[in-house]
Structures are given as structure tokens and as C-alpha cells.
Amino acid sequence: MTLPLMRNYIDGEWVESDATTWGDVFNPAKGEKIARVAYGTAADVDRAVQAALAVFPIWRETPPLTRARYLFRLKDAFEENFEEIAETLTTEHGKAIDEARGEVRRMIENVEHATGVTTLMCGYTLEDIAKNIDCYGHRQPMGVFGCIAPYNFPAMVPWWFLPYAVVTGNTFVFKPSEQVPMTQTKIMEIVDEVGFPEGDQHGSRIKGRGQRHAGSSRHPGHQLRRIDTHGTPHLPALRCHWETGPGLGRREEHCCRHARCRP
């Protein structure tokens, strides 16, 4: 029997990896091989990051409500394919089907929550913080984000971050665990049907670290922003700006908190 080969989803297309090393995906309940996955190369990562960089200026200028409409459609599509996603997860990971359903439910809830983008992206204003000085802040997208996901929750963990990063105007590259790539492959097939401009990169535990260098020397002027999978989901995807009066210029704080207004 020919095993299915897990491909990369980059720039809206399923593409073959440049890898020369492949790994096996097992059904842990039966000990059977069920798929093959490429251990992605630095060239694969570069291709995904370049695609994300190219689309970022257009995506960030798309109105937030327009971006949210993709998530509304995606949420409905996930609901329609709920059982199939859960069954795929159980097949390659081995957790009980009820646990898999719970994980997929949490994934969908994050998509649903991210549709409230107008609240997530709200800024603030305050007049007359000092004589002739007004203060205001607004949140803006930061660029390309990268996530290397763990083995234990194949469906849920990447979707703690992806909906929030994308709906707030960023682009996203992520690598599922090489042990459980089939769940996110199924999910990205659904994303592709909805028409979402996202990418999915497979790779080994070692090769996946290549994503860290992809936004540095290989792409001068751009930084691939790493997402810590132990962090707070949506907050790192935005930066705050504030003004402190005529002629004082704009400053930036690359964090999730509003800057404190200063006269």
C-alpha cells in the first residue's frame, strides 16, 4: 500500500518539499505506518516566509471586518468537518476520541473569539493630559509570525495563535510536529477551501529551528516573529503607537500593552 505523503501548504498551494529525508507517521493504537512526512529544509522555510512577507502589505491594509469574515466562514467550515478533524487527530495521536473532540472544540472557539477583532484592535484617546497635549494610541499589525507546534495537542495549540495573528492583519507560518502532521494537513485543506492566504510547513524537530534564521540574515529588514507556545494567545500580534503632542514625534513599543501616556 502506498502511504500518503504530507506536503507543504505555501501561498495557497500544496507544494512538494525539497527534503531528502523523510519520516514515518504512525497510528500509535495499532503500531501501523499511516503516512510519510518530509523533514523540511531551510529552502522550504524561506519559500514560506517569502510568501508571507509578500502578502503582508496587502493583508494588513484589508479592513479588520473583512478579515473577520474569513474567520466566520472558517468557523462554519470547521463545524461541518468537526468529526473528520477529530478522527484524524485520534488516528495519528492516539488520544481518545472524546478528548480529540474537546481539543477541536477549543480550536474552533479560538477562531470564534478572534472574530471580535474590532475589540481586540481598539486603541485609546485622552485629551489634555497636559497643557496643549493630547494622547492617543492605536494598534497595528507587526508582520510575519512563526510557530513551531508541539506534539501533544496537534489541532489546538497552533490555533491559540493563528486566528489572532491573522485577523489583526499579520501573516503566519507554522510547523506542526513531524509526529502528528496529518491533523493540520486536514485543517489546512479546509482553510484552502475557504480561501485563506496561509501557509503550513512540515519539518523535523531539528530542521524546524531553521525558521528562526529565516527572518534574519536571509531576509534583511524583516524579522520572523517567534510565538512562544506557552504565552498569551493574541496579544503579541499587535504593537502600540502613541503621540505626545505637536512636534514630539511618534514612538513605538513592541509589546502587547498600551504605552503609558507621558507629557
Image (cartoon, rainbow, N blue to C red):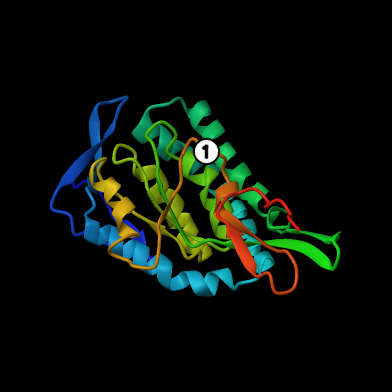
> Which quarter shows the N terminus?
top left
Q: Is residue 185 left or right of residue 139?
A: left
Name above or below for residue 31 compared with residue 258: above
Residue closer to the observer: 173 or 86:
173
> Which quarter shows the C terminus?
bottom right
Name above or below for residue 66 compared with residue 30: below
Q: Is residue 108 left or right of residue 95?
A: right
Q: Is residue 73 left or right of residue 91?
A: right
Q: Is residue 3 left or right of residue 194?
A: left
Q: Would you say residue 196 is visible in this rendering? A: yes
Residue closer to the observer: 87 or 61:
61
Image coordinates for residue 67, horizontal then vertical, percent: 62, 65
Q: Please name the amino acid that badge 1 sits on.
A: Gly
Task: Sort mark 1 into few (<14), some (14-19) or many (20+) by Cα contacts within 10 Å.
Answer: few
**How many labels sit on residues?**
1
Image coordinates for residue 194, horizontal then vertical, percent: 53, 63
Image coordinates for residue 255, horizontal then vertical, percent: 57, 50
Name above or below for residue 64 compared with residue 202: below
Query: Label 1, on which residue?
Result: 231
Residue drawn at (30%, 37%) of the image: 179
